[in-house]
Image: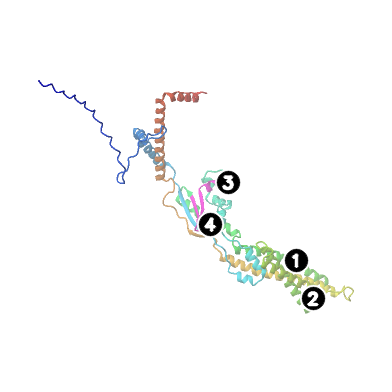
Amino acid sequence: MTPDRARPEPVPASPPTAAPAPLPARPSPDRPAPPPDRALPADAVDPLALLVVLGRRRRRLVAWPLVAALLAAGLSLVLPKTFTGVTRVLPPQQAQGGSAALLSQLGGLAGAAGGALGLKGSGDLYLGFLRSEAVADGLVERFGLQAAYGETYRVDARRALAARTRLELEKSGLLVIEVDAPEPALAADLANAYVEQLHRLTSTLAVGEAAQRRLFFERQLEKTKDQLADAELALRRGLDAGGLVSVEAQGRGAVETVARLRAQISAKEIQLGAMRAYATAAHPDLRRGEQELASMRAELGRQETGGGAAAEPAPGAPGAGGRLATGVSNLRLVREVKYQEVMFELLAKQYELARVDESKEAPLVQVVDPARPPEKRSKPKRTQLVLGAAALGLLAALLATFAEDALAAVARDPARQATLAALRAAWRRR
């Protein structure tokens, strides 16, 4: 009997190996890598949570703006209507008188007055005129605004008118006048009346370059007229006291020469005085003018001392206290009258030329768009009022919703309930 073969011992089965984890997919240009999951911070605002809160109160978010819009629409029907009158005017530009060449032919006095006394018109200047009390008082009296606005004092009526008036200077140079009134015709009349009052005010003021020259020459003419009358009166008294004394032709020529020199010196002094307002001492025109003035003064001194020496009686000369002395005294009086006559004639010509230039400047203010009664009201603006009320209603609904949600969150937190209770108790204490 053969021995039994040894049975092979069973080999224990190896435990199954776990399948390898799949490798993460590599990002490719066509398939970007997914973003890593990140938890929101504790104090971050979750947009989805906000949408949930708003969704719970969606009726409020719709009802409140709708109610606010309806209330605003009803209020716009009750509010008084306001109409706005608008007018646009063109203020005078830089005045350029046409008599500049003619004035230059009359001497240095005309050039000084024309160059130094000219005033350029500007929009800011006329804005100041329109805001003046003179214009406002004229409108208050004309339209009875003190009673229309229910004011006791005129100063309060002026303030009420200013609150209803808007004045603006556009970049184009036009002045825009807007006036609010409860009636269309009254709004247009008030806007046009502003322009009329401005015309009246500027007619009494020397605003333009020619008007400034006219005013200057008018004052100088009045002063010279009085001085000429005084010189003629002094000459008449001298003739009455000493009688009529004949003056030879040489003396008469000296009188005319001296008078004209004195007139030219006065004109040059006025010209230099005007130049010193805008030129320095080293300015070539000013220095040249001072040299001319010095030479004219020297010539006048020679005429009065040398040329008039023949007419002056020498001390101790025969007849020094007689007819010769009387003739010299009368000669001096005649010379003063002649000087005042030359000055009066020069200023009179310049005054007339200034008046001609001033008449060419009218009208000072040109109306581009006169105010007409408006067809539509300017206030209340119903569309803007309704939309604004709806926006405010929506904002109030949002604030109320978020506040209610925040209070509910505090009520759910035991740690913050104690703080909320302490806060309520603190505000309830007296």
**Residue 196 marker:** 4
Q: For the residues carrying marks 2 and 1, which lies nearer the camera in this image?
A: 2
Q: Which residues are magenta?
A: 156-179
Coloured how? rainbow
User: Foreground: 8 or 393?
Assistant: 8
Provide residue 421's location: percent of width, then percent of height. Answer: 46, 23
Q: Is residue 347 above or below residue 377?
A: below
Provide residue 304's location: percent of width, then percent of height. Answer: 79, 72
Q: Which residue is mark 3?
A: 155
**Residue 230 marker:** 1
User: Foreground: 239 or 177?
Assistant: 177
SS at mark 3 in the image: helix
SS at mark 2 in the image: helix
**Residue type (three-letter) at the residue carrying disc 1:** Asp
SS at mark 1 in the image: helix
Residue 267 seen: no
Q: Which residue is mark 2?
A: 307
User: In whole angstroms, how far apart are the C-alphas of marks 4 and 3?
Assistant: 21 Å
User: In whole angstroms, how far apart are the C-alphas of marks 1 and 3?
Assistant: 49 Å
- Find out whether residue 358 is within the magenta segment: no
**Residue type (three-letter) at the residue carrying disc 2:** Gly
User: In whole angstroms, how far apart are the C-alphas of marks 4 and 1?
Assistant: 44 Å
